[in-house]
Image (cartoon, coloured by chain):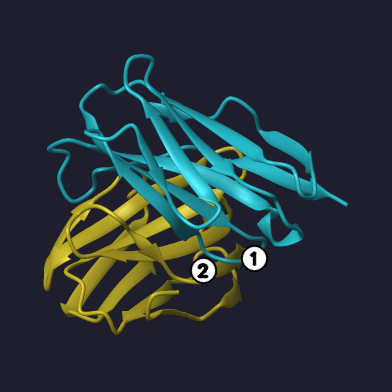
Chain colours: A yellow, B cyan
Amino acid sequence: DAGITQSPRHKVTETGTPVTLRCHQTENHRYMYWYRQDPGHGLRLIHYSYGVKDTDKGEVSDGYSVSRSKTEDFLLTLESATSSQTSVYFCAISDYQETQYFGPGTRLLVL
Amino acid sequence: GESVGLHLPTLSVQEGDNSIINCAYSNSASDYFIWYKQESGKGPQFIIDIRSNMDKRQGQRVTVLLNKTVKHLSLQIAATQPGDSAVYFCAENRKGGGADGLTFGKGTHLIIQP
């Protein structure tokens, strides 16, 4: 998984609670991404980062925020989890805005 | 809608046969394409890539063909093995698309029959 870890790998939470997912890389890549993957939709970009403290919105950013205080860590926060945010979340990294390498994913269930 | 898609959602092949997975794209500005393999419960894994100035690129048991005239991309897997069972999807990078430039297709599920 190209030196990418995600934590937790599985999480069950209740509607309305905040949730933070962590992505950690050891590759020193500049770009980091958060995607969600749902049946019938493929991978959809939530937020991405192009450097420390530099982030931008993706296609499905509503209800999510991100932070990147260090090159190696990119956090995804669900401010108030909803059932529609039940999904598998993938972190990815890249060095030159091209090939992205993915982490193992986090399965999130919002009850 | 998405500019990258796949013709077939499921492809079933016999072990040992060659597999061909297809992908259509609509954005003529795309200049870089990637194939990923995703096994059940795992993250997508990079297989092979190709730039728009190439028509063909070969890797170990895999070949990617790019036909810019009809905006078509294919992945050929030679002598498929049980370990090739997975979902395969293509991605395109829009030229000048910035850091969020990759667009992903939904995927084709490749099933290897013994």
For residue B88, the mark is none
Q: Is residue A19 above or below residue B114?
A: below
Q: Nearer the viewer, residue B55 or A60?
A: B55
- Chain letter of disc 2? A
Q: Is residue B81 above or below residue A3?
A: above
Outermost residue toward the right in this view: B114
Mark 2 vs mark 1: tell me if same chain: no
Per the image, the residue denoted by label 2 is A105
Q: Residue at x 39, y 66 (%)?
A: A91
Q: Left or right: A89 with respect to A30? A: right
Outermost residue toward the top in this view: B70
Q: x, y (%) of residue A69? A: 16, 80
- Total of numbered circles in the picture? 2
Per the image, the residue denoted by label 1 is B41
Badge 1 marks a residue whose secondary structure is: loop
Q: Quadrant of the C terminus of chain A?
A: bottom right
Q: Are marks 2 and 1 in contact (CB under 8 Å)?
A: yes
Q: Quadrant of the N terminus of chain A?
A: bottom left
- The amino acid at mark 2 is Gly
Pointer 2: residues within 10 angstroms few (<14), some, or many (20+)? many
Q: x, y (%) of residue A108? A: 57, 67
Q: Quadrant of residue A86?
A: bottom right
